[in-house]
Image: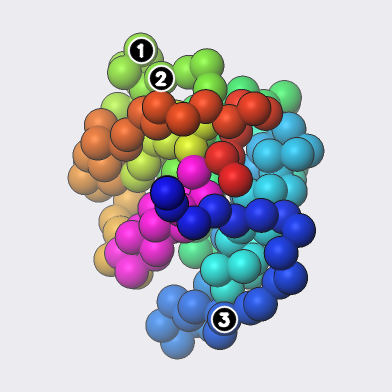
């Protein structure tokens, strides 16, 4: 049986991962569901990342224009701007950060515009906290080498596993 992360465990924080000389690694986590947003933030904080959260796509867009982030994690189903609309705006603005999109009801395989949107990874809900952390760790070393319009950003979502262990709240398995 795999070890799991519980919200009741005391927080022991490893050193904050860095993205080169730019300082600590900052992640923006956009998720409409408060439980999933807080759980995702906690999982990433425990892994040593600095995490800001927002509850809709419009707030995410404002945050991205005010703070320099190394990674964006966005749900697809959000008010004001969907995840896909947010990703499209980010890429049109020339922002180079890697993007992870999550969804329990949307699949990029069902929507061809996603192929040109600049998405790095798609994580179908539910996903484990281990998969979230591993995905973030895998994407961050490439953050400095990404170029606007690089079609390779989307190659990884096709390999994102659909997990067989459902989460009772439909998001991150604890």
Estimate the x, y position of residue 164 in percent, counting from the top left.
40, 27
Residue under the point 65% across and 43% down: 30
Please give left or right for residue 128 compared with residue 20 in the image. Answer: right
**Of label 3 and label 2, which has the lower sequence position?**
3
Residue under the point 40% across and 63% down: 137
Q: Using the image, tell me which numbered label, if any, was put on residue 107.
A: 2
Q: Quadrant of the C terminus?
A: top right
Residue indicated by mark 3? 14
Task: State the CA–CA distance, disc 3 to disc 2.
Answer: 34 Å
Estimate the x, y position of residue 157 in percent, counting from the top left.
31, 36
List the single residue furthest toward the top: 110
Estimate the x, y position of residue 81 in percent, counting from the top left.
65, 28
Residue indicated by mark 1? 110
Estimate the x, y position of residue 70 in percent, counting from the top left.
49, 64
List the single residue furthest toward the front: 1
The magenta stretch is 128-143
Q: Is residue 109 above or below residue 54?
A: above
Of residue 65 and residue 167, the one placed in the foreground of this image is 167
Residue 14 lies in magenta, yes or no?
A: no
The secondary element bearing badge 3 is classed as loop
């Amino acid at each position: 049986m795999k070890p799991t992360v519980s919200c009741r465990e005391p927080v022991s924080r490893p050193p904050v991962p860095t993205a080169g000389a730019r300082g600590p690694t900052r992640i923006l986590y956009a998720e409409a569901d408060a439980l999933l947003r807080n759980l995702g933030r906690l999982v990433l904080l425990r892994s040593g990342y600095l995490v800001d959260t927002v509850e809709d796509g419009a707030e995410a867009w404002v945050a991205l224009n005010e703070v320099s982030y190394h990674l964006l994690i966005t749900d697809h189903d959000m008010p004001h701007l969907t995840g896909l609309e947010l990703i499209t705006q980010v890429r049109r603005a020339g922002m180079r950060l890697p993007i992870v999109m999550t969804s329990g009801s949307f699949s990029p395989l069902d929507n061809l515009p996603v192929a040109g949107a600049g998405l790095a990874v798609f994580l179908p809900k539910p996903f484990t906290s281990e998969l979230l952390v591993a995905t973030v760790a895998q994407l961050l070393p490439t953050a400095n080498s990404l170029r606007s319009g690089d079609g390779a950003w989307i190659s990884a979502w096709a390999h994102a596993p659909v997990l067989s262990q459902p989460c009772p709240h439909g998001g991150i398995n604890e």
